[in-house]
Image (cartoon, rainbow, N blue to C red):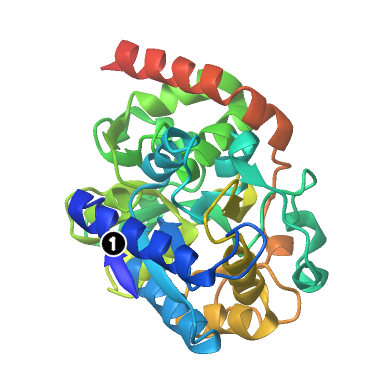
């Protein structure tokens, strides 16, 4: 496995050379025959990505993975920039809305691997290979916020006492935060978004809010589920599933249109959606919701039936993403 962390240009160039060499070695078109490489664009936590890359290489010993990591928004931007000469094969990270916002850059995924995937998580448009699922939650530092005073709902985060104390990742660069923005609109439209925005400090990284809360740099944050459970293990953080409702979204995994190693891209998607790898997700990475219905559910995580789940307006969220993000930017400027 070769890894490019944070978009190193030199390392990325080397990855591309290796990928092209592998395609050349195959002696046939990369779109119609198997190659010896896979270029994976991933925004998931390093430990989880490395686990699955290693497992995939062991399952397919002739394939070497070139790993490019970064933020979901940045990696999607790279896919768009490379549209005339795609260099990546798989975009893995964010939510179903990540690739759903730009389906012209991806190919549809249809596979027997979907048979055990929860129907409500499957992409009606056929592009996403739903590896997992997640909800957005509130996290708070137990040393800074007494349990009795902790927010219990999204609306509570609009209380003036939290001004400048709520950490939130920019939804323009974080697909999970965009899901939270849509979540708030479902509850109280833009008026609610404005109330919450007044109290927020904005981060550019999805991991920054829950990290800041765990380190005592902020009392409260908005986080995706897996990140929240990751820092809960420190004993410093509690998790709140807001009483006014959450959306539960499938994670994103998309096959890049025109990618140089299309056969291996499909193999990777099938691999991580398989029952053994879905169970490995539960066993090794607390806080991750498996997409498969054939595995044992994570201990301690509330099931969907225990939550107030709001129906996510997938089509509208995709169609209006540019407009809604522009509105978000206007609100943030107005509330600073």
Q: Secondary structure under badge 1?
A: loop
Determine whether 93 is above or below 28 in the image. above
Residue 76 in the image: x percent, y percent?
45, 41
Residue 334 appears in the rendering: yes
Q: Quadrant of the N terminus?
A: bottom left
Q: Is residue 157 left or right of residue 105?
A: left
Residue lying at 75% horizontally and 72% vertically, measured from the top left: 113
- The front one of 240 and 16 is 16
Left or right: 198 as drawn, with respect to 55:
left
Reading the image, the residue beneath label 1 is 142
Above-or-below relation of 315 to 175: above
Give the percent coordinates (x, y) of residue 305: 74, 62
The residue depicted at 55 percent of the width and 80 percent of the height is 282
Q: In the rendered image of this protein, does residue 75 appear above or below residue 77?
A: below
Nearest the viewer among 327 and 94 is 94
Looking at the picture, tell me which residue is in the foreground, 335 or 128.
128
Give coordinates of residue 77: x percent, y percent.
41, 36
Around disc 1, counting alpha carbons within 10 Å, would you say few (fewer than 14), some (14 to 19), or many (20 or more)?
some
In the rendered view of the protein, which quadrant contains the C terminus?
top left
Please tell me in which quadrant of the rendered image residue 174 appears.
Answer: top left
């Amino acid at each position: 496995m070769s890894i490019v962390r944070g978009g190193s240009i030199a390392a990325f160039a080397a990855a591309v050379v290796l990928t092209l060499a592998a395609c050349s070695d195959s002696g046939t078109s990369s779109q119609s025959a198997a190659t010896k490489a896979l270029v994976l664009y991933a925004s998931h936590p390093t430990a989880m990505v490395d686990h699955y890359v290693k497992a995939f290489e062991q399952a397919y010993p002739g394939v070497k993975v070139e790993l490019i990591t970064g933020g979901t928004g940045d990696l999607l931007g790279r896919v768009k920039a490379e549209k005339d000469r795609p260099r990546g094969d798989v975009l893995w990270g964010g939510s179903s809305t990540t690739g759903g916002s730009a389906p012209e850059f991806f190919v549809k995924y249809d596979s027997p691997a979907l048979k055990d995937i929860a129907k409500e998580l499957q992409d009606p448009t056929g592009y996403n290979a739903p590896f997992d699922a997640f909800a957005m939650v509130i996290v708070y530092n137990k040393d800074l916020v007494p349990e009795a005073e902790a927010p219990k709902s999204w609306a509570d985060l609009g209380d003036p006492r939290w001004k400048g104390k709520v950490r939130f990742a920019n939804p323009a660069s974080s697909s999970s935060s965009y899901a939270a923005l849509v979540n708030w609109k479902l509850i109280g439209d833009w008026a609610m978004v404005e109330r919450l925005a007044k109290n927020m400090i904005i981060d550019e990284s999805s991991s920054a809010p829950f990290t800041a809360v765990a380190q005592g740099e902020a009392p409260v944050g908005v986080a995706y589920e897996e990140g929240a459970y990751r820092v809960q293990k420190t004993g410093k953080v509690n998790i709140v599933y807001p009483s006014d409702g959450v959306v539960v979204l499938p994670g994103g995994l998309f096959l890049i249109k025109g990618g140089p190693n299309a056969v291996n891209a499909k193999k990777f998607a099938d691999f991580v959606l398989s029952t053994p790898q879905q169970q490995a997700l539960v066993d090794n990475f607390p806080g991750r919701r498996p997409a498969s219905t054939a595995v044992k559910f994570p201990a301690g995580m509330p099931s969907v039936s225990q939550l107030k789940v709001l129906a996510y307006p997938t089509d509208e969220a995709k169609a209006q993403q540019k407009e809604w993000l522009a509105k978000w930017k206007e609100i943030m400027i107005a509330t600073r």
